[in-house]
Amino acid sequence: MNDPTVDPHPCVLLVETDESLAERMSLDLKEAGYQTFIASDANSGWRQACELQPAMVVVDRALSGESGLKLCNQLRNSGSRIPLILLMARETVNDRVACLEAGADDYFLKPYRTETFLQMVRFYLEPETEVAEQLKFGELILDLTTRTAKRNERVIDLTMKEFELLKYLMSHPREVLTREQILENVWGYDFMGESNVIEVYIRYLRLKVEDEGNKRLIQTVRGVGYVLRES
């Protein structure tokens, strides 16, 4: 096994029981310039995560029992702040809530698609380094270069979808945005009418942005959608 401290490329740990899928993902990552390691269960995934200190861990939720979620929890409880991605076979509201509550940054829905997966990996491991650009609303600042937010000098880490949702809201300040507009512009497709995916992400975004007693910025317009305003 190669020493990840010698290879300058970011190390991605794949925790996946499906050997063929793990090998395919590993090959795609290697061709994209990443170093990869594979663990076949949660226990070996935990050991390798501790030993390798990877830049990202990708975990299949379908590990035996709920061990995929437990591994994410275990890594977060250990103090790790590296990106955690869950592979999921379905995405009901309960699945998305479980993903976020387990400490995962994001989820990737099967079936596996190379370009979509690599796009997500790049989002977390390769922030854009071009000219810095920011969106501002009151004391809330969204840095489009580092993909982080800041409020009253407090840095807020965002998942991929949280960033895209906040960016869309901050690009249309004080404008009431319907759930349909948000689904189309942030998710790019309709969840078969299941617009409560928005509520899930709004709730988690509020917990981050409005922490420490900050006044509410993301307002609910009952029966319509949401608006970014100070009162």
Image: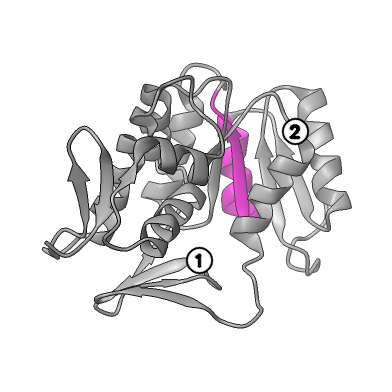
CA separation in Å, label 1 and label 2: 24 Å
Q: Mark 2: which secondary structure?
A: loop
Quadrant assignment, res 218: bottom left
Q: Is residue 224 left or right of residue 183?
A: left
CA neighbours of label 2 inside 10 A, class few (<14), some (14 to 19), many (20+) = few
- Rendering colour mode: one colour
Question: Disc 1 residue type?
Answer: Arg
Q: Position of residue 52 (x, y in %)?
A: 65, 55
Residues drawn in magenta: 42-61
Q: Which mark is residue 113?
A: 2
**Which residue lies at the image location 83% right of the left edge and 58% below the top edge?**
33
Q: Which residue is mark 1?
A: 147
Q: Position of residue 201 (x, y in %)?
A: 35, 42
Along the line of sight, which residue is nearer the eye, 95 or 53?
95
Residue 49 shown in magenta = yes
Q: Is residue 165 left or right of residue 13?
A: left
Query: Total number of numbered labels?
Result: 2
Q: Is residue 89 left or right of residue 96?
A: right
**Which residue lies at the image location 73% right of the left edge and 67% below the top edge?**
5
> Can residue 203 be seen in the rendering of this structure?
no
**Which residue lies at the image location 67% right of the left edge and 29% below the top edge?**
16
